[in-house]
Amino acid sequence: MQYTAPGRVNLLGEHTDYTGGLVLPMAIPFATTASISAADAGYRFTSTAFENTRDTYAGDDTPKANDWSDYPVGVLRELLALGLEVPPFSLNLDGDVPLGAGLSSSASIEVATTVALLHHSKASLSAQEMALLCQRAENRYVGSPCGIMDQFVVTAAIEGHALLLNTRDLSFEHLPMNSGALAECSVVVANSMVKHSIANGDYGTRRNELEVGQAAICQAYPQVRDLGDASMEQLEACRSAIPAESYLRCKHVITENARVREAAESMKRGDAAALGDAMNRSHASQRDDFQDSVAEIDFLAATAVTLYGCYGSRLTGGGFGGCTVNLVLTTAAESFQRDLASAYRKRYQIDAEIYRCTPSDGAVARLERNA
Ligand code: GLA
């Protein structure tokens, strides 16, 4: 049996998903497929993209392999921790989500594995439980301190829609991406080919800096639960009590939450220009305040907005490389792709991969469609 989970691109709301904030991602047509068959004994993981086979009983003392197989093994461990009886299996992962590009190849592997193992074990979990289980697998076993955005959208997205998610209480809304002027637009993802990994230190450092600022605000204002509640006035009042980096990280997150609210309204009105403007301001905030961009990405974003038909461009995902996401008039998408790639090649001698992405189904909707 085969089970599929997509990658995702985040339209807006970056680094807001581990301090109770808002995010606005969508699933993309790239996906991971988990093919599972019953086995006589043990648990075996293979991957079409990598040569090594991982055989494991997934006990408490299972050491990490520090490769792709830690993601599905982490998921298996979390399912076993729930008390699920998982019969022996052989599971192969295959897919086309670009690796290390900030398009959630990890979450897509985790969610495809979860769906496959649940079906193999004749068990079920709600979409929310699946997403949280995958996040635990990544936090506890893989050791990446990620938030909940990726696993949630990869599980719960539906075709034609972006997903507005409140990461504090996990309430969400599917926002159609075809109203008004948005119907004339495409989401174009430009891969800088500069590798990004959230398992390395930069993501964790930013997260710590942010949490220092959040703790100071929550202490000064007991009614504030997390940065999702905090205002710029409250941050300014705490400014002298926190390091300069923490101030900048919090400034990004507080203003980013406001931009997501604004962007969700623009999306409902079908106002592509307003959505694009929020994306551009988000990029400036990441570049200057959160400081998770790199020169190649800044070049892609700055060049994109000079090209005909582009409403907005920004760094998407964990940062420090990866991709930009662009909102572009569909009739201009082809020339946009060509001109952006050519400017990038001229400046960096790198061939960017540029993809037009339609908002796609998450793993649950895929399963229901195939049922
Ligand atoms: C990575 C993480 C997410 C989120 C983004 C930044 O993709 O997995 O949880 O924090 O970075 O918005």
Image: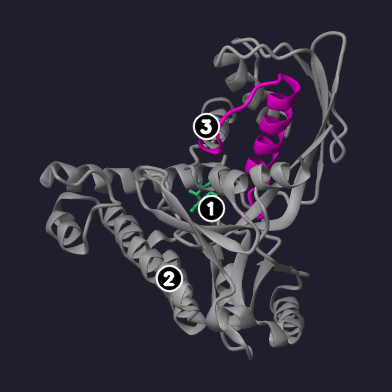
Residue found at x 67% / y 51%: 7
Q: Depth check: 268 or 274 in front?
A: 268
Amino acid under label 1?
Gly
- Depth check, mark 2 against mark 3: the one in front is 3
Q: Is residue 133 left or right of residue 43?
A: left
Check whether the beta carbons of the residues at disc 1 and disc 3 lie within 8 A of each other: no
Tell me: is circle 3 under 8 Å from ligand 1.
no
Residue found at x 43% / y 61%: 291
Residue 353: horizontal and vertical position, in percent? 76, 67
Mark toward the start of the polypeptide (1 vs 2)? 2
Amino acid under label 3?
Glu
- Please name the residue that numbered disc 1 is placed on: 318
Tell me: is circle 1 under 8 Å from ligand 1.
yes
Q: Which numbered disc covers residue 263?
A: 2
Q: CA distance from mark 2 to mark 3?
A: 28 Å
How crowded is the residue under tag 1: few (<14 C-alpha within 10 Å), some, or many (20+)?
A: many
Tell me: is circle 2 under 8 Å from ligand 1.
no
Q: CA distance from mark 1 to mark 3?
A: 23 Å
Q: CA distance from mark 1 to mark 2?
A: 20 Å
Mark toward the start of the polypeptide (2 vs 3)? 3
- Please name the residue that numbered disc 3 is placed on: 129
The span picked out in magenta is: 101-128
Magenta segment includes 316: no
Secondary element at tag 1: loop
